[in-house]
Image (cartoon, rainbow, N blue to C red):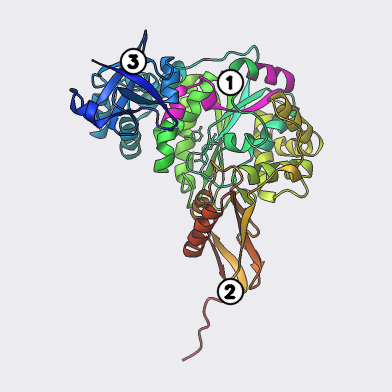
């Protein structure tokens, strides 16, 4: 046991514990050791790093860790050796391609939620799922435990929801679909995650306009008032393991299928959703490459839904190029608002996707007859969705806002076509990489605005796209990347002329 005086660190690395090298030398500990930090009746796990940033007799811990321990700067805490988490053996079992039992999966989730696993261990779990997968029994256990380890919401009437598996840039459909469905009288308390593989998750986009970190009580009030909401799952104590795994998935840029299924469905189970529509974008550069793979994933969502008592339908949607033209939180919020303000001016792909998905939900909810949902949704988009969206923004704690008031990055650069021709290729992955390099999603004002889409005719010097950032340096890096990646290819229609011999 070692007693040390707390120093608070402004570092975003939850389990980081700094100790002066001299103190480490004089103790039984080594850098990299996992330790239990004890303060009064609270315990947390941390990993020791050696650093002269703290003086002898001090221990540097993050503000977040201090908050969990309820300890203040200058107070004394105790550390002792931590046992290896028991679930580590099961993570290794999955690495060795074995099936895990329900109890083993429950323990992994429990230890994850109780801060007993370090990011390295969680990352090994995520990677093992990426490589070795899980069967439906395992996925069901993972989903149920992810939901049960947080709060579970109950409603007096049926609630609906829509959720995209993501992967396609510019996927701001929910900012239209939710108000359309809510304005038809169905309850739709939508939870989203932040970006996983993309440059902006729905929660990141919505946060530009209003609060997304509502409590369950607040959500209930918003839904009572407006029928809908668009909130961030990670802010609530709703399926807490979801946000923990997403924070590991994001830097790896992967979304393993068992986690994709459990991440989405655990949030829906915890939120008490009864009828759900899943959007599965299909395309070369998204999570699901073709229709065959899409059908398979859809069947898995439907089966998992049955096991959880959530009536689930799926829509396979076009994912070969971005939805709409804006990529990045503020740019997407602006485009969604523009489209709600005047759907005639909105990007076709955005209006089409949002009304198709809303239409299916309206049919599932008995509001529209079979086959007529899209038409009803379009009408609601023109007549009611904008006002409903404003009501939701205000009820969540924001202010009514017009699209022209949304600020985007003050540093920007236009990228123009090097030749005459047609846009023959627009790469999702490359556009996402450029938007991220410019700072999205953390820099809400960063991103890419596409002036052209596949098939458009362009002349040399015409604007192809604009990159925005709040930082001059990040913009420079994004430009450099854009110049090497060529995310948009322009070619003439004539490929080759062949003459007779
Ligand atoms: O595209 P990437 O970042 O991989 O996936 C994450 C996004 O997909 C889902 O979309 P929605 O909430 O249904 O709109 C999530 O909630 C999140 O916004
Ligand atoms: N893995 C996930 C993909 C899409 N949405 C989620 O909430 N989670």
Quadrant housing residue 279:
top right
In this orientation, does residue 382 appear?
A: yes
The reply to whether the C-beta atoms of the residues labelled 1 and 3 are less than 8 Å apart is no
Residue of label 1 = 274
Q: Earlier in the sequence, mark 1 or mark 3?
A: 3
Looking at the rendered image, the disc whose residue lies closer to the viewer, 1 or 3, is 3
Q: CA distance from mark 3 to mark 2?
A: 69 Å
Q: Is mark 2 within 8 Å of ligand 1?
A: no
Q: Is mark 3 within 8 Å of ligand 2?
A: no
**Which of the two residues, 477 or 25, is positioned nearer the viewer here?**
25
Lateral position of residue 169 relative to residue 354, left or right:
left
Instruction: Farthest residue to the bottom: give it.
Output: 501
Report the span colored magenta.
219-244
Rendered location of residue 384, percent (x, y): 79, 33
Lateral position of residue 73 relative to residue 282, left or right:
left
Q: Earlier in the sequence, mark 1 or mark 2?
A: 1
Lateral position of residue 447 relative to residue 429, left or right:
right
In this orientation, does residue 158 appear?
A: no
Mark 2: secondary structure: loop
**Quarter holding ligand 1:** top right
- Residue 234 sits inside the magenta stretch: yes
Residue of label 3 = 77
């Amino acid at each position: 046991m070692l007693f040390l005086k707390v120093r608070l660190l402004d570092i975003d690395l939850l389990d980081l514990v700094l100790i002066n090298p001299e103190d480490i030398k004089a103790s039984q500990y080594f850098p990299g050791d996992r330790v239990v930090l004890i303060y009064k009746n609270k315990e947390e796990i941390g990993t020791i790093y050696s650093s002269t940033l703290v003086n002898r007799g001090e221990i540097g811990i993050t503000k977040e860790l201090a908050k969990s321990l309820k300890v203040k700067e200058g107070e004394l805490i105790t550390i002792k050796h931590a046992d290896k988490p028991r679930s580590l053996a099961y993570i290794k079992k999955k690495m060795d391609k074995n099936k895990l039992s329900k109890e083993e999966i429950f323990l992994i989730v429990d230890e994850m939620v109780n801060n007993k696993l370090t990011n390295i261990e969680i990352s090994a779990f995520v990677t093992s799922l990426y490589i070795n997968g899980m069967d439906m029994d395992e996925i069901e256990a993972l989903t149920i435990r992810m939901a049960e380890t947080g709060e579970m919401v109950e409603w007096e009437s049926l609630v609906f929801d829509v959720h995209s598996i993501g992967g396609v840039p510019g996927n701001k459909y929910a900012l239209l679909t939710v108000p359309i469905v809510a304005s038809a009288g169905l309850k739709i308390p939508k939870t989203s995650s932040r970006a996983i593989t993309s440059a902006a998750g729905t929660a990141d986009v919505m946060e530009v306009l209003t609060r997304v970190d509502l409590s369950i009580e607040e959500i209930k009030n918003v839904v009572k008032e407006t029928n809908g909401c668009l909130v961030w799952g990670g802010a609530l104590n709703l399926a807490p393991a979801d946000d923990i795994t997403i924070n590991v998935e994001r830097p790896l840029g992967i979304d393993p299928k068992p986690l994709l299924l459990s991440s989405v469905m655990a949030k829906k189970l915890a939120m008490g959703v009864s009828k759900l529509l899943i959007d599965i974008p299909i395309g070369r550069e998204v999570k699901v490459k073709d229709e065959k793979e899409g059908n398979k994933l859809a069947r898995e969502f439907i089966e998992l839904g049955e096991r959880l008592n959530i009536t689930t339908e799926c829509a396979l949607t076009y994912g070969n190029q971005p939805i709409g033209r804006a990529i990045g939180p503020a740019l997407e919020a602006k485009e969604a608002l523009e489209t709600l303000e005047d759907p005639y001016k909105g990007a076709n792909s955005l209006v089409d996707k949002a009304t198709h998905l809303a239409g299916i939900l309206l049919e599932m909810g008995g509001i529209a007859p079979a086959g007529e949902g899209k038409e009803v949704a379009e009408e609601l988009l023109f007549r009611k969705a904008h006002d409903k969206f404003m009501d939701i923004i205000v009820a969540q704690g924001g202010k009514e806002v017009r699209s022209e008031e949304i600020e985007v990055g003050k540093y920007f650069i236009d990228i123009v076509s090097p030749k005459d021709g047609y846009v023959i290729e627009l790469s999702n992955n490359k556009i996402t990489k450029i938007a991220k390099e410019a700072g999205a999603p953390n820099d809400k004002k960063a991103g890419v605005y596409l002036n052209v889409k596949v098939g458009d005719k362009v002349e040399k010097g015409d604007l192809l796209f604009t990159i925005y950032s709040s930082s001059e340096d990040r913009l420079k890096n994004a430009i450099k990347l854009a110049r090497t990646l060529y995310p948009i290819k322009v070619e003439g229609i004539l490929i080759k002329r062949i003459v007779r011999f």
